Image (tube, rainbow, N blue to C red):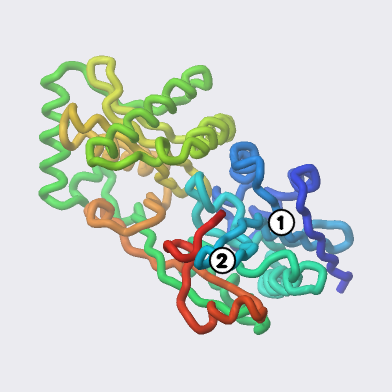
Amino acid sequence: MQTITPHIMTSWSEIEKLKEDWNPLLQQSDADNIFLTWQWIESWKKTCSPNTKPFFVVLKQAQQVVAIAPFYIQPYRLFKFFTYQVLRFAGDQGIGSEYSNFIVKQEQTIQLKALLWSTLLTSDQASQWDLIWYSNVASWSKGGKTLLTSLQKTPQLNMKSRVVEFANTELKNVSEQVLPSLSKSLRTNIKQTQNYLSRQGDWQVSFCDDPSLLEKELNRLFELHNLRWQNAGLQGSFERRPEMAAFYQDFAVKALQLGWLRLAKLECEGVTQAMQIGYVYQDQFFALQEGFNADFQNGVGQVLRYHVFQQCLKEQLTDYDFLGVYTNHKRRWLAQKREGQNLLIWPNKIKNVLFRLMTIWPTGKYFKPL
């Protein structure tokens, strides 16, 4: 076997050189999903904080890229006194990335993933970081299982895990008309809302396919999403995280060009009352964000989702993936719960003793990003 050589890339100019190899490697891997595409990572790179420090681990064999682990370094503070350099997965905050994984050549999947972990432990690299916060692992999938197996083959790394819920509807379980598959209460709500819309005048559901209208349509999505949460006394995602809006504006252009974008809107008498954005990738629909005018009519968001489900069936897609969090609302749309994992990983360093003795997650009040 030819020698595999590791490379650590800490500048965007270096990472840009991976562009041609990235998607072909991803597409043959066991972790192929839209959140790992070059386009997604590139848009994250463009819209993340200018202070973001990339830390991409790359393996090459005969000058060919055979494995990529895209991290960045985030400083954290524990108990206001101790500072840690934490490796986080590229795109994991601010933009809604899911299903973190390594991208590797399939013929050597577990070996290469294990080698990526062990590369982080070499004397040159171990001093650069203290912990790894690895979130939203799809541990039910083939790629998630091989990632966890490779981690278990790296005994120098300690790990604690926490279950996180996801929700997915397999479309083979949904009838072509959609409504007969749903509960009586949901069917009634959709029918009554459609009757209400018809009484108001002309209404329709459409999908944006015009690049010249994309910015305007996205701004309306942001507005409706924020209004929905403001009515509940909360801040919407785009209001709390302006970098998310910037990311959507950038990535949606690429997604439209590639045929991935599904930006749906429901109009009544020429006014957009509900919107939903998602992407189609590998015959699956990924539902990202939605918004609706809660002051217009209760149930208008359900009607829009009903029509998006119909479009998914028309395209013969296999899944409607609700992504993170399993809720009663998603259950009503026939979603099944999936259990993934968040992983806190650390090497044997004196400053990491507390993480062995105690359960401390980087999501609470004691351990926060700087």
* Classed neighbour count for the residue bearing mark 1: other residues with Cα under 10 Å, few (<14), some (14–19), many (≥20): many
User: From where the camera sits, is residue 25 visible?
Assistant: yes
Q: Residue at x 40, y 65 (%)?
A: 164
User: Does residue 137 appear in this view?
Assistant: no
Left or right of residue 320: residue 360: right
Q: Which residue is label 2 attached to?
A: 81
Quadrant assignment, res 349: bottom right
2 vs 1, front mark: 2
Q: Amino acid at mark 1?
A: Phe
The answer to which of 210 and 225 lies nearer the viewer is 225
Placement of the C terminus among the 4 image quadrants: bottom right
Residue 272 is drawn in which quadrant?
top left
Q: Is residue 331 left or right of residue 32?
A: left
Q: Are marks 2 and 1 in contact (CB under 8 Å)?
A: no
Residue behind mark 1: 55
Dot 1 lies on which element? Answer: strand
The one nearer the camera, 52 or 298, is 52
Residue in the picture at 47% in, 72% down: 360
Between discs 2 and 1, the one toward the N terminus: 1
Q: Three-letter amino acid code at disc 2?
A: Phe
Between 254 and 71, the one lying in front of the other is: 71
Gap in Å between the C-alphas at discs 2 and 1?
Answer: 25 Å
Residue at x 27% of width, y 26% of height? 273
Seen as rendered, the residue at the extreme front is 81
Q: In the figure, is residue 180 to the left or right of 173?
A: left
Where is residue 111? Give x, y as percent: 71, 74
| Residue at 70% over, 52% down | 54
The picture places residue 316, in percent across and down from the top left corner, at 41, 45
